[in-house]
Amino acid sequence: MEKIITWFASTHIQEQITNVDLALFSNPWFIIPFGLFMAWMLFKQNFKEIIIIALLIAAWWVSGTSYMSDLVVNGEIQINKVLPVFFGAAVGLGLIIYLLFGRSN
């Protein structure tokens, strides 16, 4: 178990998640292959996957907003701000589950 914790700490994934910014979408080494991938998905008319990718990008973007950084103030969770995030995440997850398992395509 300690090896896994050491590996996780060495990858700095938690820092990358907490330091979300939109610089990735200005990087041509990411945006060109991503744009080609999205064009291929449109060509193949895989709208289910496009919607899932859009939801994941939206969740990633929302996680970097100031609203998310204000969820904990002075070590206390602001329940009036957590509930909308919780219900929004539940709706997004429900939509993804519906798209993956609810429709036979």
Image (cartoon, grey):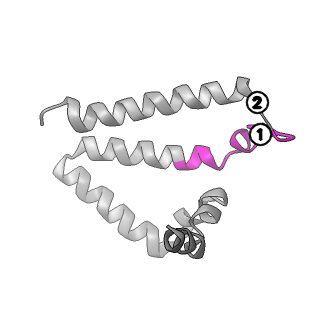
Answer left or right for 13 relative to 99: right
Q: Which mark is residue 92?
A: none
Residue kind at label 1, given as amino acid type: Val
Residue at (40, 69) in percent of width and height: 32
Residue at (72, 23) in percent of width and height: 80
Can you give x and y, in whole percent of width and height, for residue 52 in the image?
35, 43
Vertical arrangement, residue 26 with respect to residue 49, above or below? below
Query: Of 44 and 61, which appears nearest the observer?
Result: 61
Indicate whether residue 62 is drawn in magenta: yes
- CB atoms at circles 2 and 1 under 8 Å apart? yes
Numbered label tally: 2
Disc 1 designates what residue?
72
Quadrant in which the C terminus appears: top left
C-alpha gap between disc 2 and disc 1: 6 Å
Q: Which residues are magenta?
A: 60-75
Other residues around mark 1 within 10 Å, as few (<14) / some (14–19) / many (≥20): few
Disc 2 designates what residue?
78
Write down the quadrant of residue 21 in the picture.
bottom right
Vertical arrangement, residue 100 with respect to residue 37, above or below? above
Residue kind at label 2, given as amino acid type: Gln
Residue at (32, 56) in percent of width and height: 38
Closer to the chain start, of discs 2 and 1, is 1
Can you give x and y, in whole percent of width and height, for residue 100 in the image?
24, 39
Other residues around mark 2 within 10 Å, as few (<14) / some (14–19) / many (≥20): few
Query: Of 69 and 11, which appears nearest the observer?
Result: 11
Answer left or right for 37 relative to 69: left
Residue at (63, 25) in percent of width and height: 83
Query: Of 60 and 22, which appears nearest the observer?
Result: 60
Indicate whether residue 73 is drawn in magenta: yes
Can you give x and y, in whole percent of width and height, for residue 75 in the image?
82, 41
Secondary element at tag 2: loop
Can you give x and y, in whole percent of width and height, for residue 50 in the image?
32, 46
